[in-house]
Amino acid sequence: MDGIAYDVHPYILLNYKDKYNDVSTLAHELGHAMHSYFSNKTQSYVNSHYPIFLAEVASTVNETLLIDFMLKRIPNKEERLALLGNALDNFRGTLFRQTQFAEFELKINELSEKGEALTGEQFTVLYLEIFKKYYGHNDKIMWVDDVFGVEWAYIPHFYYNFYVYQYSTSFTASQALAAKLIAGERGLVDKYLAFLCSGCSKYAIPTLQSVGIDMISDEPFNLTIERMNYIMDEIESLINT
């Protein structure tokens, strides 16, 4: 999705093969498109580009609403398991994995601030240590082979600015927001539309607070974990029937 054409409309370039992942990707990119469209229509050019801290909120809200919509309409056990597994993997890949990446980046920056030399060998040792911690290797939850230590080398985000943590924060905000939308919280749809129109007219934290998501509090994270636990409970229930 590219929403940079301020005076026209966002553009989406998409491969589509009529699979669920294609529908989910379309919903995700339409979330970005909605955000760009409303911000461009409402804000001046200077304030139309929403900050990276908010960039993945609308897209992942759409993904969550889509899965909720599908689960309410699909009785087939195998299809439900596939959808729930997909949703759970989003938690692993975004909430946990991106936080793991951010911790790795933070350690690198701390070493740099101390004036220490940065080497690929050092990165591999550091990355593997963090990787094993996140996947429970030392607690024998799962085995992590040492070859994963070099994974850092082909992750392009590490060659950009320090921002991967914002995938996790956006995901946490979106899960909390989706939970409130699904629950039918009064007046939230209008607040959400105002959020989509906000661009960068305010700082990111107050912008989220205006739609009832306070990232300074524990509530968004707690709602996110509740959603993850619900998905795991549903998976276990289906497997045991």
Image (spheres, rainbow, N blue to C red):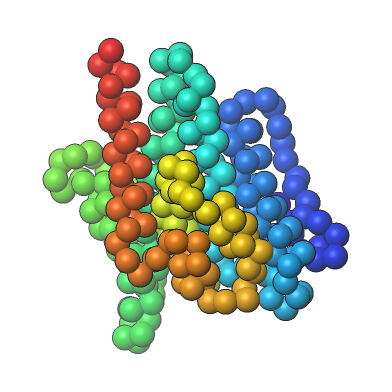
In the picture shown, does residue 133 fall above or below 83?
A: below
Residue 117 at x, y percent in the picture: 36, 80
Above or below, comparing residue 188 to residue 218 in the picture:
above
Q: Which of 185 and 61 is in front in this view?
A: 185
Residue 176 lies left or right of residue 18; in this view the side is left
Horizontal side, residue 192 vs residue 4: left or right: left
Q: Which residue is drawn at 73% across and 67% down?
A: 42
Expressed as whole percent of the image width and height from the top left, the position of residue 125 reads: 29, 61
* Quadrant position of residue 49: bottom right
Q: Residue furthest left?
A: 139
Could you say where residue 148 lies in the image, as x and y percent from the top left?
35, 48
Q: Is residue 223 above or below residue 195?
A: above
Q: Position of residue 79 (x, y in %)?
A: 47, 19
- Picture quarter containing residue 172? bottom left
The one nearer the camera, 39 or 6, is 39
Residue positioned 77% across, 55% down in the render: 10
| Above or below 86: residue 211 | below
Q: Can residue 238 be seen in this view?
A: yes
